[in-house]
């Protein structure tokens, strides 16, 4: 039926699969996206939102490299918020609330308008492996499709099992069948597999809620956007709302614990630590009398509501009974109860940094199959897998982002080096160089890289070069512009800052606590110049001036670590032969097989003493 041999076959149409297919196809590879249901391409399986703490940085990075997630998020946004503005710029994180149906529709449209990309609807039940190399897939219809590489992005579908109380359903999402066959084949080939758990909250009818007793959460007054392209900014926004559980709700939920698969032993796999179910919260944090819930709209033209924070696998009758004791939910009508889902994953220490498997050449894993959780983490992996599959097929160099270059680099290095035994979620705290990896400079960090590999356009490159030039111009002006005491002291007084008795440069004043470029623009002379620059240019110049010392210090630390990155470890290095290494270090490094000393130093259980032994043994 399909006689073409593709350069790349992508299995799965979720966030990882969509980015992988788009990247490979846009780079010029003949690409086939195989999905079980063409109607659920780009589906937001859980919350209708993109971005958030550290995740927003990943979306910006995907966009800067030439991926689609930022563009799709902007086109389907119903609200925008910049989180953590009360903290330093390293912590600022963009987030959109999205129209679920529009999000999937925009992904479908974007992919159908991508050259070199074909589609096929069927379940992939096995891979075609020849000489330890992936050369195609076999579908449930018995159709063999040949390719030069395969990317698996199966999400929660591999032997997926849905739990609602004591009921169990086979499926990858509620109402959709699970995939089977791939796990068993990979295990037979020598791969290690495991089981993980995630969950989702109930969806309810917004018409049955009383919003007057809830706390309204509006979007930003001046909403920004994810993409560095000309996607539209929001001119109107939908509000979210906040409510709280109470002790009555908790007591009712406890009534169902003996029927809960989490507590009766039915579920034995590990769930996400940082997004626990409501029953897990009230069990682990028994001293708390309430938990926060976010009431999130699913879109512009639907009354469906996502009850963020009420993820549950309890029986549906318990879920509904408990919800009706939440303020504003007294008459709630439920569209769908919450549920938990167990699925297969493959510990990511079995991968190289390109996301190609170590055991089978030209086979790549991306997304939840690697033990991650979250749309953004999946999309970032999919983009990198798509790029590297294309490069491998066409004889080009690997494309790897380092930890000081992108959150995507931190994510993949963490997975490959440390592995994960619970669903991995990105946080700013995971990045040791987070002041360099800000959301505002993702384009400065990565657009040129995206352009060089052929994914980001020349127009994008020119735009970011202009931003860099303009930012430098504004910085130079502020460093040179002198302010006399009579001019600056009235402004300092507004922020309770000590007055000055001599002239200072504007850049020096800007470094004071609570001072901002916006406040300095109250001064005639600065206002006229600063207002001629775009908002993102002014923001970049201000951050560069205020945090220059910290930024330079982080760059020095990067330079020190990069010296260790240049010290390569031979591919067939025998750690067991080094008697001075700890037993744990031998075991961990043999399993991970690090490429460099720096990577070895990041392996959990490898001590600085072990690294010193390695350096001596390698003659360094």
Image (tube, rainbow, N blue to C red):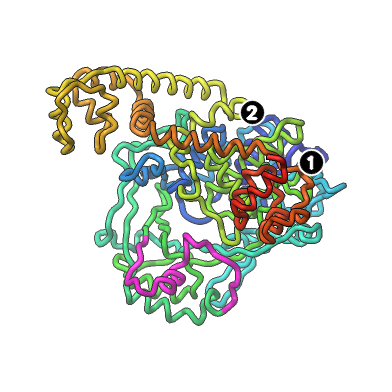
Q: Is residue 284 magenta?
A: yes
For this view, does 385 lie left or right of residue 132? Answer: left
What numbered label is drawn on residue 147?
1
- Can residue 293 be seen by looking at this rendering? yes
Q: Measured from the top left, where is residue 381 in percent x and y?
A: 61, 45
Label 1: few (<14), some or many (≥20) within 10 Å? many
In the image, 456 versus 500, the foreground residue is 500
In the image, 421 versus 52, the foreground residue is 421
Residue span colored magenta: 265-293
Q: Measured from the top left, where is residue 143 in percent x and y?
A: 81, 50
For this view, does 545 lie left or right of residue 525? Answer: right
Question: For the residue labelled by badge 1, is the local secondary structure a helix, a strand or a loop?
Answer: loop
Q: How many marks?
A: 2
Q: Is residue 187 magenta?
A: no
Label 2: few (<14), some or many (≥20) within 10 Å? some
In the image, 540 versus 584, the foreground residue is 584
Against 230, is 343 above or below?
below
For this view, does 376 lie left or right of residue 383? Answer: left
Give the quarter of the image for residue 205: bottom left
Question: For the residue labelled by badge 2, is the local secondary structure a helix, a strand or a loop?
Answer: helix
Q: Are circles 2 and 1 on residues that touch, CB within 8 Å?
A: no
- Can residue 158 be seen by looking at this rendering? no
Against 264, is 171 above or below?
above
What residue would you read off at disc 2? Answer: 453
């Amino acid at each position: 039926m399909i006689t073409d041999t593709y350069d790349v076959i992508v299995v799965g149409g979720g966030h990882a699969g969509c980015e992988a297919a788009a990247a490979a196809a846009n780079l010029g590879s003949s690409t086939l996206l195989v999905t079980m249901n063409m109607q659920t391409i780009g589906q937001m399986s859980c919350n209708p939102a993109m971005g958030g703490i550290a995740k927003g940085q990943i979306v910006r990075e995907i966009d800067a490299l030439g991926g689609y997630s930022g563009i799709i998020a902007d086109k389907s946004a119903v609200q925008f918020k910049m989180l953590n503005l009360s903290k330093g710029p390293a912590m600022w994180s963009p987030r959109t609330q999205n129209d679920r149906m529009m999000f999937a529709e925009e992904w479908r449209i974007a992919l159908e308008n991508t050259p070199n990309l074909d589609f096929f609807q069927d379940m992939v039940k096995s891979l075609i492996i020849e000489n330890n190399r992936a050369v195609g897939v076999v579908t449930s219809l018995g159709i063999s499709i040949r390719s030069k590489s395969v990317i698996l992005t199966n999400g929660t579908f591999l032997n997926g099992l849905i739990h609602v109380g004591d009921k169990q359903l086979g499926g990858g999402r509620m109402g959709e069948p699970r995939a089977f066959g791939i796990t068993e084949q990979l295990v037979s080939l020598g791969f290690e597999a495991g089981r993980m758990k995630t969950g989702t909250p109930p969806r309810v009818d917004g018409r049955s809620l009383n919003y007057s007793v809830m706390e309204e959460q509006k979007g930003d007054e001046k909403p920004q956007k994810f993409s560095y392209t000309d996607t539209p900014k929001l001119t109107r926004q939908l509000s979210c709302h906040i409510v709280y559980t109470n002790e009555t709700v908790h007591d009712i939920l406890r009534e169902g614990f003996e029927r809960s698969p989490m507590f009766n032993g039915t579920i034995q796999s590990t769930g996400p630590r940082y997004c626990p179910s409501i029953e897990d919260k009230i069990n682990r944090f028994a001293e708390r009398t309430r938990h926060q819930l976010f009431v999130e709209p699913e879109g512009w033209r639907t009354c469906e509501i996502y009850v963020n924070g009420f993820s549950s696998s309890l029986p549906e009758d318990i879920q509904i009974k408990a919800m009706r004791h939440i303020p504003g939910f007294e008459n709630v009508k439920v569209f769908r109860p919450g549920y938990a889902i167990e699925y297969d994953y493959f510990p990511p220490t079995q991968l190289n940094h390109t996301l190609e498997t170590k055991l089978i050449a030209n086979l790549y894993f991306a997304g939840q199959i690697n033990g991650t959780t979250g749309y953004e983490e999946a999309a970032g992996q999919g983009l990198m897998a798509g790029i590297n599959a294309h490069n491998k097929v066409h004889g080009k160099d690997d494309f790897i982002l380092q930890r000081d270059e992108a959150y995507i680099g931190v994510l993949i290095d963490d997975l490959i080096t440390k592995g994960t035994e619970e669903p991995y979620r990105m946080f700013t705290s995971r990045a040791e160089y987070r002041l360099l990896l800000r959301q505002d400079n993702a384009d400065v960090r990565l657009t040129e890289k995206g352009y060089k590999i052929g994914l980001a356009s020349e127009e994008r490159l020119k735009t970011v070069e202009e931003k860099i030039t303009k930012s430098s111009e504004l910085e130079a002006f502020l460093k040179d512009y002198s302010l006399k005491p009579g001019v600056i002291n009235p402004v300092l007084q507004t922020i309770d800052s000590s007055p000055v008795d001599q002239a200072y440069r504007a850049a020096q004043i800007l470094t004071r606590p609570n001072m901002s470029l916006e406040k300095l623009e109250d001064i005639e002379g600065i206002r006229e110049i600063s207002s001629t620059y775009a908002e993102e240019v002014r923001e970049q110049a201000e951050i560069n001036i205020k945090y220059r010392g910290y930024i330079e210090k982080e760059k020095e630390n990067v330079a020190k670590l990069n010296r260790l990155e240049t010290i390569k470890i031979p591919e067939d290095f025998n750690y067991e032969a080094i008697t001075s290494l700890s037993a744990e270090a031998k075991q961990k490094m043999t399993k991970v097989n690090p490429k460099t000393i720096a990577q070895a130093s990041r392996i959990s259980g490898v001590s600085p003493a072990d690294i010193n032994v390695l350096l001596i043994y390698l003659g360094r």
